[in-house]
Amino acid sequence: MPKKVDHSKRREQIAKSTWEIISQKGIEHATTRKIAEETGISQSTLRYYFPTRKELLKFAMELLKENVGVRIKKIMEKDLPVLEKLVQLLMEITPYNDISRKEMEVWFAFITHGRKEDGFDLNYDDVLKVIELVLTTLEENDLLKKNISRDIELEKLYSLLDGLAIHALFNPERYTPSYIRSIIENHLMSMVVID
């Protein structure tokens, strides 16, 4: 009797193998042959799911974004004080643990690849959307200082997170999870009304 294959899970498995290769060796080493080997399937099976490398890379990128989005949604659904919720949310888009570190390495590889590859639309303003959510949440809870420019705060927080992401990737001994968290908390406190 033929084995029943869950095609959705197989596609995810292939994408995760792609992430593994990218995080270990770089996106240029994520060839269909190496991805098939890493996944434990033949190249023809891989081509059944992803006829081109570009389609595979796009799917792997979208799955990565989706996974982060699911974690962010779970954080927003938690019953936590607003500031704690927002700190956790911002931590989720920094490389503070093994999972997020690997995702960030892969994400930066996708950004670099997307700048060189025609038709590889990154649409990478998802971080901007998270920051807008943070600012909106602060406003809705009357926590955002009235005398600050929302646009400038958005750019400051965006720059801070980008900087933390890069430094934490290249210097994880210095940028520990607790250090990243304290920097995020400190910045948020500079934006909020304190009673």
Image (tube, rainbow, N blue to C red):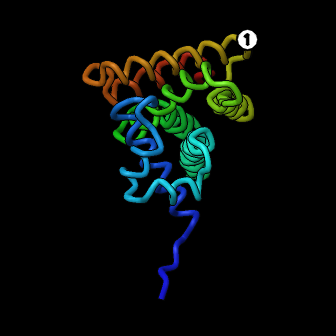
Q: Which residue position is annotated with label 1? A: 149
Using the rendered image of the protein, determine whether residue 138 is visible from the camera's viewpoint.
no
Q: Position of residue 144 (x, y in %)?
A: 68, 23
Closer to the camera in the image, 98 or 47: 47
Position in image of residue 36 (x %, y %): 43, 51
Figure check: 152 above or below 79? above
Q: Looking at the image, which is closer to me, 13 or 92?
A: 13
Outermost residue on the left side: it is 173
Give me the residue at 50% from left, 26% from top. Answer: 108
Name the residue rendered at 54%, 70% in the picture: 6
Where residue 26 sits, quadrant-wise, is top left
The part of the image, by quadrant, that contains residue 101 is top left
Could you say which quadrant of the image residue 190 lies in?
Answer: top right
Where does residue 29 sit, x and y in percent of width and height? 40, 33
Badge 1, how many Cα within 10 Å: few under 14, some, many 20+? few
Residue 149 visible in the current orientation: yes
User: Residue visible at 28% across and 19% down?
Assistant: 174
- Single out the residue that lies furthest toward the bottom: 1
Task: Give the quadrant of the C terminus.
Answer: top right
Up-down: is 3 above or below 137?
below
Nearer to the camera, 124 or 145: 124
Where is residue 122 shown, x and y percent of the image?
65, 30
| Amino acid at dot 1 | Ser
